[in-house]
Image (spheres, grey):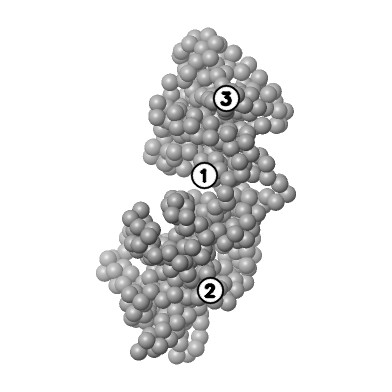
């Protein structure tokens, strides 16, 4: 059995993913999305950039072990040969040992059944004593991220442990090369080696004993996992509580200690029973969310609904605003505005698009001209991103405060309005999930923000206008979905208010 650094990384994020990577039916895996492939390409390009930059700054060119793809033993032998020669830098070397060298107890007894593998981005020669002579190697990983995440540091400690086994000496340091101001970050091995060994032993035990972890749907992490489809099917069949908005892994653990593990038991619980580990508001929300899903009905939040209703103006002209952005370029490339004229009964969509990155300032000025043409119109959007972006662009392209402040005062965040006023019988509160529930359909059902980024990058590369048109169509549908949601919320709150008069 192979336990790679990648599998140990996945284990820290989701035990089940590592289990399925070893024992799962591979025919059930979903191929990587265009966006995931884009991220992989960006990481590889970033690595090559860093390696080339280091050479320009005086580092010696790196060596890379040559071996047949997938033959880890040959890769380890080729890497060891380079280390014995004392080359200065090794890129993507293979470190290999058995689990018995690290485990303890039963894991140590069975550890010979596990082959531990890692391939740090760089092994760098340093003065010292090792089996090879008066030198040893220290590991470095190159990441796109700007933060030294815990899982990165535990993987660095894993490289260190395996490296010690291969060269017969402990490196005193391990490094992360991060993007941004931090640059090189030294890993605190005194702290992370014990943490890594505990994590590794638990992971080995799970795999050796074939302990299949419970399914848990964590939206941000699961969205990029190839096992999402089979895991979601299991969670759906079980009505698993992780499908409820607000049930995080730590909150679920608390619910388990209270034996509230079913939708029915949580819906029947007194919120006070969930305190003090959960705050009063959180406890009330979780119970109410369970009730909404179980009974398939919208639940009004009486204390907030009137405030929300009074803050949702229905004006003669309303604007609906949605943005598409490319984070890797720090670029907002599309400012989409839907102008709804209720008196004329018309809807007009204005896609202000930067056909090249240098056009961002131009579309910002176009946006200011457009919204100033409707000075009394409220501007509805979904999430804080639109307001935050207006602040960013106003600062980036110096815009008078007397122009920006009145503009921001017209913004109405419908995400906040919805979550304050009602609890919906849904698995989440994304715009697409709610709008689909209301019967709205995107013209391209597979389109999303990540796909839009990929389309834009491809547009910049190829100039294929069909890609740009797909982005505009998706953004227009987002604006129209926001409009549909706003009208529904106003109607629902008005009906609820009239019933209570």
- Does 21 sit above or below residue 200? below
Residue 150 vs residue 50, the one in the foreground = 150
**Circle 1 crowding by C-alpha within 10 Å: few under 14, some 14–19, many from 20:** some
Residue 273: x %, y % from top left: 37, 60
> Label 3 vs label 1: CA separation?
24 Å
Mark 3 and mark 1 lie on one chain; the one further toward the N terminus is 1
Q: Are marks 2 and 1 in contact (CB under 8 Å)?
A: no
* Residue at 50% in and 78% down: 484
* Residue at 52% in and 63% down: 263
Label 2 sits on a secondary structure element that is loop
Mark 3 and mark 2 lie on one chain; the one further toward the N terminus is 3
Label 3 sits on a secondary structure element that is helix
Residue 132: x %, y % from top left: 55, 11
Disc on res. 13: 1
Residue 390 vs residue 362, the one in the foreground = 390
The quadrant holding residue 452 is bottom right
> Label 2 vs label 1: CA separation?
32 Å
Q: Which residue is mark 2?
A: 296
Label 1 sits on a secondary structure element that is helix
Q: Are marks 3 and 1 in contact (CB under 8 Å)?
A: no
- Does 345 sit above or below residue 159? below
- Does 15 sit above or below residue 379? above
Residue 79: x %, y % from top left: 62, 21
* Residue at 42% in and 27% down: 189
**Circle 3 crowding by C-alpha within 10 Å: few under 14, some 14–19, many from 20:** some
Disc on res. 108: 3
Residue 265: x %, y % from top left: 49, 63
Q: Quadrant of the N terminus?
A: top right
Q: Is residue 170 visible?
A: yes
């Amino acid at each position: 059995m192979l336990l790679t650094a990648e599998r140990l990384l996945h284990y820290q994020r989701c035990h089940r993913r590592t289990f399925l990577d070893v024992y799962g039916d591979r025919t059930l895996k979903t191929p990587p999305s265009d966006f995931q492939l884009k991220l992989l390409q960006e990481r590889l390009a970033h690595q090559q950039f860093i390696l080339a930059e280091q050479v320009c700054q005086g580092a010696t060119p790196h060596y890379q072990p040559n071996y047949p793809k997938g033959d880890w033993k040959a890769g380890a032998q080729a890497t060891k040969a380079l280390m014995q020669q004392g080359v200065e830098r090794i890129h993507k070397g293979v470190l290999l040992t058995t689990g018995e060298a690290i485990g303890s107890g039963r894991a140590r007894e069975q550890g010979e059944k596990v082959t531990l593998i890692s391939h740090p981005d760089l092994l760098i020669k340093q003065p010292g004593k090792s089996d090879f002579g008066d030198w040893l190697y220290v590991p470095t990983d190159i990441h796109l991220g700007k933060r030294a995440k815990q899982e990165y540091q535990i993987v660095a400690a894993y490289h260190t442990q395996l490296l010690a086994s291969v060269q017969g000496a402990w490196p005193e340091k391990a490094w992360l090369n991060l993007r941004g101001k931090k640059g090189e970050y030294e890993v605190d091995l005194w702290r992370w080696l014990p943490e890594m060994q505990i994590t590794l032993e638990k992971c080995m035990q799970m795999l050796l004993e074939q302990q299949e972890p419970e399914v848990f749907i964590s939206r941000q992490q699961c969205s990029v996992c190839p096992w999402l489809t089979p895991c979601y099917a299991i969670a759906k069949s079980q009505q698993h509580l992780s499908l409820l908005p607000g049930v995080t892994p730590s909150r679920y653990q608390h619910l388990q200690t209270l034996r509230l593990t079913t939708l029915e038991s949580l819906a029947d619980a007194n919120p006070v029973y969930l305190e003090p580990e959960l705050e009063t508001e959180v406890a009330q929300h979780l119970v109410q969310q369970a009730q909404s899903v179980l009974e398939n009905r919208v639940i009004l939040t009486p204390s907030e609904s009137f405030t929300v209703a009074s803050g949702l103006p229905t004006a003669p002209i309303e604007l609906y605003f949605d943005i598409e952005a490319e984070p890797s370029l720090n670029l907002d490339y599309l400012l989409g505005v839907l102008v709804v004229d209720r008196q004329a009964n018309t809807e007009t969509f204005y896609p202000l698009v930067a056909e090249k990155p240098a056009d961002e300032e131009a579309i910002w000025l176009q946006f200011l001209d457009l919204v100033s043409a409707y000075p009394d119109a409220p501007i509805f959007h979904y999430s804080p991103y639109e307001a935050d972006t207006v602040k960013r662009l106003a600062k980036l392209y110096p815009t008078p405060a007397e122009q920006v402040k009145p503009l921001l005062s017209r913004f109405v965040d419908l995400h906040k309005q919805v979550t304050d006023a009602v609890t919906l019988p849904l698995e989440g509160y994304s715009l697409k999930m709610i709008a689909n529930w209301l019967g709205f359909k995107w013209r391209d059902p597979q389109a999303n923000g990540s796909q839009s980024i990929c389309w834009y990058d491809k547009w910049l590369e190829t100039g294929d206008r069909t890609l740009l048109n797909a982005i505009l169509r998706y953004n227009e549908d987002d604006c129209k979905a926001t409009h549909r949601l706003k009208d529904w919320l106003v109607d629902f709150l008005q009906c609820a208010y009239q019933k209570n008069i």
